[in-house]
């Protein structure tokens, strides 16, 4: 197999991890919404924490994206 | 075709403009220096003139300061701990926030000098983010050594004393202590992983923002890039907050808890 073909295949394989990141973020947002439903007074606080949590759970997807550009 | 606007994608490394005494000057470095000088000018000319009864600009600065302090206190848990680390964390919030946003101002990245872009977002350059992450993790190690003492600091990674005490209690507790010893060795690798994860997260978000803007412009140049730009504004602010709060969280893990101090 030539180098070009292997590079393109590797680029495609590197994006498989985005699947896990989406599942993790969906779970996190679901739990945050449930907590807001139980205690609507703290909803501003919980929303801020949820955004920070989503940015951290997205980081493995960002590693895959950086790898995609480097290959 | 007028639908599309072709531009070339920025490379991963920055473009070097020249050298000063042998040190290469990259195009993202110019904006970093510019932001530092801007913050120094604001600190001298605006903040020195604060009065007892605040007017509108002072109100804005105090609001930002108090919200940053409250966020840090929520992470570190106690007021005095957060006051100790707040100069570093507040500077991280402000510097990274401005650095992420300055690339989105229209026209800043359009100046060219001998064919390369003259300015580039500072945090979309891997050198800047790795430098920041290494400096922060090194600072946390130094603070940890100062707090626990040199042998206490090594004893957090190589837990010989816990293994000895565990075997004195019994074989079961001794085996648990061996597992803890291996986990302590893994903590050394975790410190390196912290540097990599901090730097890659910030770099990846900002660099992907630039590349996707070029790709969207070459597909549909009319309304769609504006949507992407507004999403990029949100990501820029959120990534600054995440970097600062992660450094604060690593700091609060590296020092003694309040319960241990009062013993």
Image: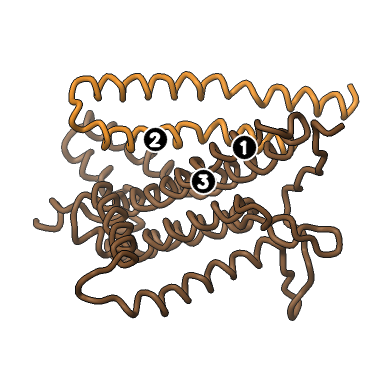
Residue B150 visible to the viewer: no
| Chain label for disc 3 | B
Examine the rendered structure and indicate whether residue B198 appears above or below residue B221. below
| Label 1 sits on residue | B226
Crowding near the residue tagged with mark 3, few <14, some 14–19, many ≥20 C-alpha atoms within 10 Å: many
Q: Which one is in front, B96 or B59?
A: B59
Distance Cα–Cα, label 3 vs label 1: 15 Å
State the image coordinates of residue A45 (x, y, percent, origin top left).
26, 37
Could you tell me which residue is drawn at 54 percent across and 66 percent down?
B35
Q: Callout 1: helix, strand or loop?
A: helix
Crowding near the residue tagged with mark 1, few <14, some 14–19, many ≥20 C-alpha atoms within 10 Å: some
Chain B colour in the picture? brown
| Label 3 sits on residue | B236
Residue B23 visible to the viewer: yes
State the image coordinates of residue B99 (x, y, percent, origin top left).
54, 57
Could you tell me which residue is drawn at 52 percent across and 43 percent down?
B233
Chain A colour in the picture? orange
Q: Seen from this angle, which residue lies furthest left?
A: B263
State the image coordinates of residue B67 (x, y, percent, origin top left).
29, 53
Discs 2 and 3 lie in a common subunit: no
Q: Where, by quadrant of the figure, is residue B127 drawn? A: bottom right
Examine the rendered structure and indicate whether residue A42 appears above or below residue B59. above
| Label 2 sits on residue | A51
- Foreground mark, 2 or 1, reads 1
State the image coordinates of residue A10 (x, y, percent, origin top left).
74, 26
Distance Cα–Cα, label 2 vs label 3: 13 Å
Q: Which one is in front, B235 or B78?
A: B235
């Amino acid at each position: 197999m030539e180098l070009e073909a292997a590079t393109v295949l590797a680029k495609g394989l590197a994006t498989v991890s985005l699947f896990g990141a989406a599942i993790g973020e969906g779970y996190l947002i679901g739990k945050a919404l449930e907590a807001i439903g139980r205690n609507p007074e703290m909803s501003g606080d919980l929303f801020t924490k949820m955004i920070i949590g989503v940015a951290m759970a997205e980081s493995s997807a960002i590693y895959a994206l950086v790898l995609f550009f480097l290959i | 075709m007028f639908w599309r606007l072709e531009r070339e994608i920025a490379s991963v490394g920055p473009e070097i403009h020249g050298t000063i005494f042998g040190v290469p000057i990259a195009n993202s470095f110019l904006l970093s220096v510019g932001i530092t000088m801007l913050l120094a000018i604001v600190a001298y000319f605006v903040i020195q003139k604060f009065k007892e009864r605040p007017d509108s600009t002072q109100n804005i600065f105090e609001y930002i300061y108090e919200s940053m302090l409250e966020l840090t206190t929520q992470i570190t848990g106690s007021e005095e701990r957060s006051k100790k680390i707040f100069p570093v964390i507040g500077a991280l919030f402000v510097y990274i926030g401005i650095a992420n946003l300055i690339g989105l101002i229209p026209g800043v990245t359009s100046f060219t000098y001998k064919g390369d872009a003259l300015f580039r977002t500072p945090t979309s350059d891997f050198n800047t983010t790795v430098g920041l992450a290494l400096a922060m993790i090194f600072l946390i190690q130094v603070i940890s050594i100062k707090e626990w003492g040199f042998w206490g600091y090594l004893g957090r990674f190589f837990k010989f004393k816990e293994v000895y005490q565990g075997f004195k209690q019994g074989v079961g507790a001794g085996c648990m202590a061996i597992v803890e010893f291996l986990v302590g060795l893994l903590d050394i690798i975790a410190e390196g992983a912290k540097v990599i994860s901090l730097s890659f997260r910030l770099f990846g978000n900002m660099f992907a923002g630039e590349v996707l803007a070029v790709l969207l412009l070459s597909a549909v140049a009319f309304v769609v890039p504006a949507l992407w730009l507004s999403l990029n504004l949100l990501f820029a602010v959120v990534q600054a907050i995440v970097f600062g709060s992660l450094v604060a969280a690593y700091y609060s893990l590296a020092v003694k808890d309040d319960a241990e101090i009062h013993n």
